[in-house]
Amino acid sequence: MKKTALVLSGGGSRGAYEIGVWKALKTLGIQIDMVMGTSVGAINGAMIVQDDLNLAENLWLQLETSMIFDIGENESHTDDTLLYAKEIILHRGAGSSGLSELLHKYIDEERLRKSHMGYGLVTTEFPSFKEYSLYKNDIPKGRLIDYIMASASCFPAVRKYNINGKSFIDGGYRDNLPVSMAMQQKASRIIAVDLQATGVIKQNVLNEAADICEEFHLIKSHLSLGNFLIFDKINTTKIMTLGFLDTMRNFNKYDGKIYTFRKNNFTPHQLKGAENAADFLGLDPCLIYDRKNFISLIQKQLKAFQNTPSFSESLSQFKSVKWSDTKKSVDIIKSIVADSDLRMSFVIYISESLKENREESIFLNPSVFRLFCPEIQAANFLIHQNLL
């Protein structure tokens, strides 16, 4: 029987994504035998070991920056990033009394210690930068929350955390994705979640795990998960959904790379064009699409785009490009599509060229195709679906 480890990286507010991953693993019926985490991954890991998904979801869906860090909640009209900067300058980092209160409310040390699931975290001693990789049995009784706080002290944005006269800072300074801890516990299946925040990722360890483990899954978003220091309820809901969908696709329950499609609604070739078209038209990546509703939404968005005042003007810009000098023309096109709002106009321009010139279209020139592959794939998809 597989021994499954869930490994959670640090990443502040992006940690909501990890709760989405956990929800997907529950949906898939995957039993977790141990959880290793750094920073917010250590916090989420503790809640996972308690095995109360509803509690974790409810916590995350209420979080705001001022509930966690002491950055002047009365200064509601000031950008949170500026408030962090102020705390760094005046107090050597924001305080975290709010986080401490939340952890004491939501984490039950006795329940965690009695769980069949293993648990581990990483923190960093300061100023020596010595790594502490601690399993639950290594942590003195009654001090679990202290060590979780130490793991999540994102210095210098957050103040150092003191335990028994020693200063500790975020575990991400040494190992932000502690896969090695799972390997030391002989996990045969490792599911690692990378929030792509600041911190050390030991790529050699990930490579080793991929080579020697029976199964190794690395789950991370292809989309931005937001500023890791800012806790925002709307973004939390979004990235929790992304974590769920990314995991379901990783385990081959849906198709797609960024967007989520029901199985076998499109061929692999069609999927590339479909995803690019969805991206350029701004479809919601938090939905599950089948062929019918996807085509309907693409058609609706495409019509709305073609009715915008800027569409005709931008299309004329592309049509004015002379292709007698390919390099010069490519440079002109690149300068225009640097404005992301014009990429869909470029896709429509490509589709007209493909329909009019067929195999003679400049966009089937291998060197041009390589430069504008996503746009050409989107155009080709829209043509073959009779949308252009």
Image: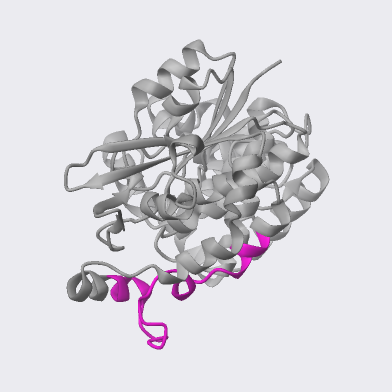
Q: Quadrant of the N terminus?
A: top right
Q: Residue at x 25, y 53 (%)?
A: 167
Q: Is residue 248 visible?
A: yes
Indicate yes or no whether the magenta region holds residue 239.
no
User: Vertically, is 1 above or below 60?
Assistant: above
Residue 348, x across and y down, in percent? 56, 49
Q: Residue at x 42, y 33 (%)?
A: 178
Which residue is nearer to you in this view: 279 or 331? 279
Q: Residue furthest front?
A: 141
Q: Is residue 346 visible?
A: no
Q: Residue at x 58, y 56 (%)?
A: 107
User: Vertically, is 196 above or below 14?
Assistant: above
Indicate yes or no whether the magenta region holds residue 69.
yes
Scheme of image coloration? one colour
Q: Residue at x 72, y 57 (%)?
A: 54
Say whether residue 141 is left or right of residue 290: left
Which residue is nearer to you in this view: 151 or 191? 151
Report the span colored magenta.
Answer: 57-84
